[in-house]
């Protein structure tokens, strides 16, 4: 009989190959047992995770992640879908740097927001998912989106102009850092309704960051040397 679970190491974290013939509860117990056996190897690790073999609902995925975190010292940063794994690899270095600067003083929201939804934080905030048009993210500290930012985002709520907003891709003109608004300009000086700044280089996709420079909010490709 095939193994209940196989753990594979990937550049973004952990890939689980799950036996589709098992009941979910039985599978979850097997996953917990497997991770506990490997606790010394994964101790205090912060990882992305992906799944193969077992067709889980979103609720089951989060239940499995909660069980892993409850029974081990692992912190799961994000769930990687197959089509996003390549983009996650592109973000690997930037992601590690952002986590080192943000995660110690931020709340983490797992999952994409819905239009009309608003999230506020008295510290920084990390969104593991997308922020669609109509959604709002407001934080006293930095904002990091591991996905696409299309809604409104305000970092440095209490006037911190050193805060920043970073995302895999940004497709909005509605950004604010401290008291400064970002207003994208089209040719001729007219306001644009929005922008799309995810660039593709020879190495792949480039994450983007909005920050304050010389009294203005600017957008540019993210590199670990910026912050």
Image (spheres, rainbow, N blue to C red):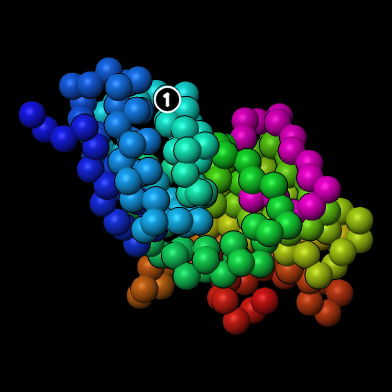
Q: Going by the image, does 198 lie left or right of 134? A: left
Q: Going by the image, does 177 lie left or right of 23? A: right
Q: Nearer the viewer, residue 56 or 71?
A: 71
- Residue 119 magenta-highlighted: yes
Secondary structure category for the residue under label 1: helix
The image shows residue 44 at horizontal and vertical percentages of 50, 56
Residue occupying the point 30% across, 26% down? 27
Q: Nearer the viewer, residue 191 or 13?
A: 13
Point out the image quarter for the C terminus.
bottom right
Q: Can the viewer see residue 192? A: no
Q: Nearer the viewer, residue 17 or 152?
A: 17
Task: Using the rendered view, name the quadrant where residue 86 is placed.
Answer: bottom left
Q: Note whether 68 is above or below 86 in the view shown.
A: above
Q: Can the viewer see residue 27? A: yes
Q: Nearer the viewer, residue 19 or 210?
A: 19
Residue occupying the point 79% across, 45% down? 121
Q: Note whether 36 is above or below 117 in the view shown.
A: below
Q: Residues within 10 Å of mark 1 (few under 14, many from 20)?
A: some
Per the image, the residue denoted by label 1 is: 60
Residue occupying the point 37% across, 43% down? 36
Point out the image quarter for the N terminus.
top left
The image shows residue 171 at horizontal and vertical percentages of 60, 52
Residue occupying the point 26% across, 51% down? 8
- Residue 127 magenta-highlighted: no
Total numbered badges shown on the rendered structure: 1
Q: Note whether 53 is above or below 160 in the view shown.
A: above
The magenta stretch is 113-126
């Amino acid at each position: 009989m095939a193994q209940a679970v196989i753990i594979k190491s990937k550049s973004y974290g952990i890939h689980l190959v799950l036996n589709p013939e098992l009941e979910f509860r039985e599978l979850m117990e097997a996953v917990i047992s497997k991770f506990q056996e490997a606790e010394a190897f994964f101790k205090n690790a912060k990882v992305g995770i992906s799944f193969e073999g077992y067709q889980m609902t979103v609720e089951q995925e989060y239940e499995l992640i909660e069980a892993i975190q409850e029974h081990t010292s692992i912190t799961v940063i994000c769930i990687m879908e197959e089509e996003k794994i390549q983009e996650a690899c592109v973000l690997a270095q930037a992601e590690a740097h952002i986590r080192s600067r943000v995660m110690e003083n931020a709340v983490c929201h797992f999952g994409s927001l819905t239009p009309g939804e608003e999230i506020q934080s008295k510290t920084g905030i990390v969104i593991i998912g997308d922020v669609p048009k109509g959604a709002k993210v407001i934080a006293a500290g930095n904002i990091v989106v591991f996905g696409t930012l299309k809604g409104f985002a305000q970092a440095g709520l209490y006037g911190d102009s050193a805060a920043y907003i970073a995302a895999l891709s940004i497709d909005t003109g509605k950004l604010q850092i401290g008291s400064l608004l970002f207003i994208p300009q089209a040719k001729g000086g007219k306001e644009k309704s929005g922008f799309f700044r995810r660039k593709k280089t020879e190495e792949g996709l480039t994450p983007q960051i909005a920050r304050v420079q010389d009294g203005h909010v600017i957008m540019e490709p993210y590199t670990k040397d910026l912050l």
